[in-house]
Amino acid sequence: MEWHCWIVLLLQFSVVAFRANVTASKDPNEKRLSFLQQSKCTYSYELAVHTARGSKSTESDGFQVHALVDITAVSRENEAGTPVHLYKLDIREPRLRRVLYGRVLNNYPVNEEFEEQLSKPFYFRQKEHGPVMEVLFPKTKESPEVAAFKKG
């Protein structure tokens, strides 16, 4: 699987965790979680990876990725009256493991190029309380797969 698929997967899980709120309760002192401008959140992930393959999109590839993900607010702008936020996503210490039937395969080779590419920071734009609108990758050498992914 190409490295950009892993980044998008981590981004999706980051946004879900990032948007989590504490549910309202009867305690008046309990407050909802919010993300303050110029602050940073760090999440730790261990997740199974699924590749989008049309009707087979729920089948696991048998990989797990472990990473620390830092989300930092960069800017906020209004686009047609709707607030849009720009966030920087830093993925630290990514590790890829091959898993078969719930067991880790220790002899499976690690793709160091994947880990190196995944460690590069990138940005994403998101509507307030809405979907991710755009993912912005760093300008480096670009494979044809990455270029096609950005266009598609």
Image (cartoon, helix red, strand yellow):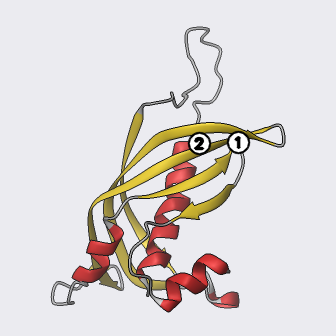
Near-viewer residue (28 or 38): 38
Q: Earlier in the sequence, mark 1 or mark 2?
A: 2
Q: Is residue 104 visible?
A: no
User: At 56% from the left edge and 38% from the top edge, which residue is drawn?
Assistant: 75
Residue 121, how many percent across, how many down?
Answer: 38, 59
Residue at the left extreme of this rendering: 107
Question: Where does the image place residue 116, in percent across and percent down from the top left?
Answer: 26, 73
The spot of residue 136 in percent (x, y) is: 53, 63
Quickly name the residue at label 2. Answer: 19
Q: Residues within 10 Å of mark 1 (few under 14, many from 20)?
A: few
Quadrant containing the N terminus in the rendered view: bottom left
Residue drawn at point x = 43 percent, y = 66 percent: 138
Task: Name the disc covering residue 129, or none.
Answer: 1
For residue 139, say whether it is visible.
yes
Q: Is residue 47 left or right of residue 133?
A: left
Looking at the image, residue 120 sits to the left or right of residue 129; the answer is left
